[in-house]
Amino acid sequence: MIKLAKVKKITVPGLRHTHVNILINKNINVKAIAERLGNTPGMIYNVYGHVFKELEEESVKLFKWSLEESRANRGASS
C-alpha cells in the first residue's frame, strides 16, 4: 500500500516524533502534549528541547523585525 500511495515509510516512533513536532510548532501547551503522550512536561522538554530552541530563535527574529518596523513607521510619520 505504501508503494501504491508513493509515500515514505515511517515507523511508529517516527510518527510519534513527527506528531509532537507538529503540536509544538502549533504552540500547543507542553502539559497537554505530555498528557497526550503519557509523559511529563519535563520529558517533553528533554527530548524536544531543540525544537523549542528553534522556536525561541524565530520569535527573537520576529520581535527584532517588529521593533525595526515600528521604528521605520515612526520615522516616516515624524
Image: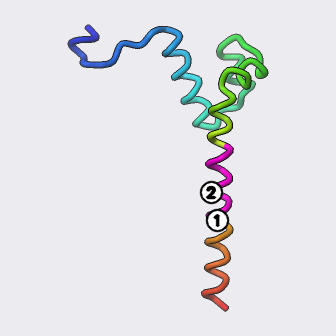
Q: Which residues are magenta?
A: 56-65
The quarter in which the N terminus is drawn is: top left
Q: Hey, which residue is sitting farthest left in the picture?
A: 4
Residue at image coords 73%, 25%: 45
Q: Is residue 18 above or below residue 70?
A: above
Rounded to the nearest angstrom, the CA distance separating label 2 from label 1 is: 6 Å
Assess whether mark 1 and mark 2 are in contact (beta carbons under 8 angstroms).
yes
Picture disc at residue 18: none
Q: Is residue 67 above or below residue 14?
A: below
Q: Is 2 left or right of 43, judged from the image as shown?
A: left
Quadrant containing the C terminus in the rendered view: bottom right
Within-10-Å neighbours for mark 1: few <14, some 14–19, many 20+:
few
Q: Which image quadrant is residue 11 in?
A: top left
* Residue type highlighted by circle 1: Ser
| Residue drawn where x is 63% and y is 55% of the image | 61
Q: In the rendering, which numbered label is found on residue 66?
A: 1
Q: What residue is pinned by disc 2?
A: 62
Q: Quick check: is 77 in the magenta stretch? A: no
Majority secondary structure of magenta residues: helix
Local crowd size for mark 2, using a 10 Å CA cut-off: few (<14), some (14–19), many (≥20): few
